[in-house]
Image (cartoon, grey):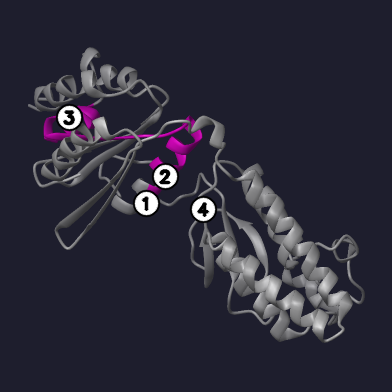
Amino acid sequence: MVNSDLGKEVIKKEIPLVPKLPGVYRMLNAKNEVLYVGKAKNLPNRLKSYVSEKNHIIRTERMLSQTTRLEITTTSNESEALLLEANLIKKYKPRFNILLRDDKSFPFIFIGNKDKWPQIKRHRGKKNREGFFFGPFASAGSANWTIKMIQKIFQLRVCDDTVFKNRERPCILYQIKRCSGPCVGYVKKDDYKKSVEDAIEFVSGKSRKIQKNLSAQMEKSSEDLDFEKAAILRDRIKSLNIIQSSQRINEANLVEADVIAGYKESGKTCIQVFSTDPSKIGAIKLFSQNMIQMKI
């Protein structure tokens, strides 16, 4: 007979320590294997259900009978918890998670790297194509918005191969400066390839580097008296600045903040502490030491 009391006791002890925030919880066994990954809008309330409910399904009973440790990660909102849950399930493939193992519920952005004129598109399902996948995104809307921004800055094509190969003149996306017109040879292959590489770096989080590269290209184009290309690059830099400004943290909310950063590799953990209040340093260092001892 399956005995779920072990896991329930572990959860009972952890609940008072868990903040009332959205986040993700991971249940682990004695071998530190992740058994289950779950998300919650309110973590304590979700965890209490494992303890208070008497008649769990057999899969949950078995999971609780093997649970010896609980790990918690809080997030800013429910959408972040949803994405973190998807990533952790993809990473650990817990035996008691059924959904999300193939990432079919979340959209990704795909940029090909084998075609002569790579395409950018939204992608769902298994990642069985050669290229770069970015995501998952919380919704199709957020993925579409990102694609539009990439179109605006880097002017990559979004049309499928059939339409691309049969065009005799560029579509409206070229007219509104969302595409460089590779279908009719309005852009050189090397220039388009560079735009693809820049787009990949941009989505990977290297927007500052891209901005410097675009600025250097704009200056060179001006020196070469290629003012049309310089104007295009200027517009790309402007769009990039708008995106960067919209993604900045509101500094008004950071009047006072303590920052703890941790990194673990090859069995060694490094903790870096930043605080504006010297009286807190001792407490923060003690917290950091406890994190290391708990193998977090």
How many marks on residues?
A: 4
Q: Is residue 289 visible?
A: yes
Q: Could you tell me residue 202's position as x and y percent?
A: 59, 63
- Residue type beneath disc 1: Lys
Q: Nearer the viewer, mark 3 or mark 4?
A: 4
Q: Are the residues flagged by discs 4 and 2 in contact, CB closer than 8 Å?
A: no
Query: Secondary structure under badge 4?
Result: loop
Q: Could you tell me residue 266's position as x and y percent?
A: 17, 63
Q: Are the residues flagged by discs 2 and 1 in contact, CB closer than 8 Å?
A: yes
- Residue underneath mark 2: 86
Q: Disc 3 and disc 4: Cα gap in Å?
A: 31 Å
- Residue type beneath disc 4: Gly
Helix, strand or loop for the magenta stretch, by majority: helix
For the record, the magenta segment spans 58-87
Q: Disc 1 and disc 4: Cα gap in Å?
A: 12 Å
Which residue is pictured at 72% across the width and 54% down the height?
Answer: 148
| Residue 287 figure quarter | top left
Q: Could you tell me residue 60's position as x and y percent?
A: 23, 29
Q: Earlier in the sequence, mark 3 or mark 1?
A: 3
Q: Earlier in the sequence, mark 1 or mark 4?
A: 1
User: Badge 3: how crowded within 10 Å, few (<14), some, or many (20+)?
Assistant: many
- Residue underneath mark 4: 135
Q: Are the residues flagged by discs 3 and 2 in contact, CB closer than 8 Å?
A: no
Residue 90 circle label: 1
